[in-house]
Image (spheres, rainbow, N blue to C red):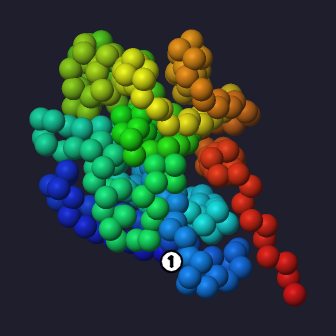
Amino acid sequence: MAILNLHFFSRCLKREVPLTALLPVDSPFLPAQEDSTFQPLKALYLLHGYSGTHSDWVNFSRIRELSDRYRIAVFMPSGENHFYVDDEDKGALYGEYIGRELIDFTRKLFPLSSSREDTLIGGLSMGGYGAIRNGYKYSDRYGHIIALSSALIPYKIANMEPGFKDGIADYGYYRSVFGDLTKLLGSDKDPEAIVRRLCERGEELPNLYMACGTEDFLLDVNRRFHHFLEANKVEHTYRESAGAHTWDFWNETIADGLNWALGEPPAYPKAD
């Protein structure tokens, strides 16, 4: 397993950005292969939550083990509390960075498959929203979405007024990230609107796996999006189980999500 901490210049964000990468080019869970049989790696672009950073998944989860077992490269960028959406006023295009630039950059640098079906996006909380929003918005690039405890907050903050404050942030923050909140629903920051447009155009949607704990404070918005997809006959997998907004839940569901997307991983090698 190669673990890399990179910095590179992003044209979308107009500055140098950090990236953590896992490359299972020497996985102990797979038999040795001759170079002639080498296959390009599948890739998962994995997003952190609010107040987190690009190293969270490596520090707090079992993603290194899963990367090894599934032989899938994992790339973890920094979202910097911007919900992975574009800030047109500042010219900081976080969505475009996740949806195009990061994929193009990593494919040039590493032995990755260029197939849509081999390209996954996932995340937790803020990153779950980012995975859904960008997985659908850039549906020509992503074949699978794994969204855990997704912070689908457009449902909660649309049309909020100055002076609003919840347990996480206030009107000023939400306005700075999502723009005019009276125009949020129906915009390209509204996952429902993106899905409707894809369906109207008859375009192929990525496969979606959603999971949320029954003790999670975001359960209501996850159920709401699930019901929207059901009503519009959009195929997806939705799972609820006991759990809160914690790494215990995300460790369980990232493994389940990868199993859903990729099937059973190779068995652990037997001891001699």
Q: Is residue 192 visible?
A: no
Q: Is residue 228 above or below residue 140?
A: above
Q: How many marks?
A: 1
Residue placed furthest toward the right? 272
Q: Residue at the spot x=69%, y=36% of the render?
A: 243
Q: Is residue 231 visible?
A: yes
Q: Residue at the spot x=33%, y=16% of the render?
A: 185
Q: Is residue 232 above or below residue 118?
A: above
Amino acid type indicated by mark 1? Ala
- Between 167 and 106, the one nearer to me in the picture: 106
- Between 70 and 126, the one nearer to me in the picture: 70
Q: Is residue 213 above or below residue 56?
A: above
Q: Residue at the spot x=53%, y=43% of the render?
A: 144
What residue would you read off at disc 1? 2
Image quarter of the C terminus: bottom right
Quadrant assignment, res 68: bottom right
Q: Residue at the spot x=21%, y=20% of the render?
A: 180
- Between 159 and 237, the one nearer to me in the picture: 237
Whether residue 167 sits left or right of residue 27 in the image: it is left
Give percent across and percent down for residue 90.
12, 40
> How packed is label 1: few (under 14 Cα within 10 Å), some, or many (20 or more)?
few
Give percent across and percent down for residue 41.
52, 66
Whether residue 82 sits left or right of residue 34 in the image: it is left
Whether residue 129 sits left or right of residue 208 in the image: it is left
Image quarter of the N terminus: bottom right
Give percent across and percent down for residue 248.
67, 48
Q: Secondary structure at mark 1?
A: strand
Quadrant assignment, res 172: top left
- Between 30 and 183, the one nearer to me in the picture: 30
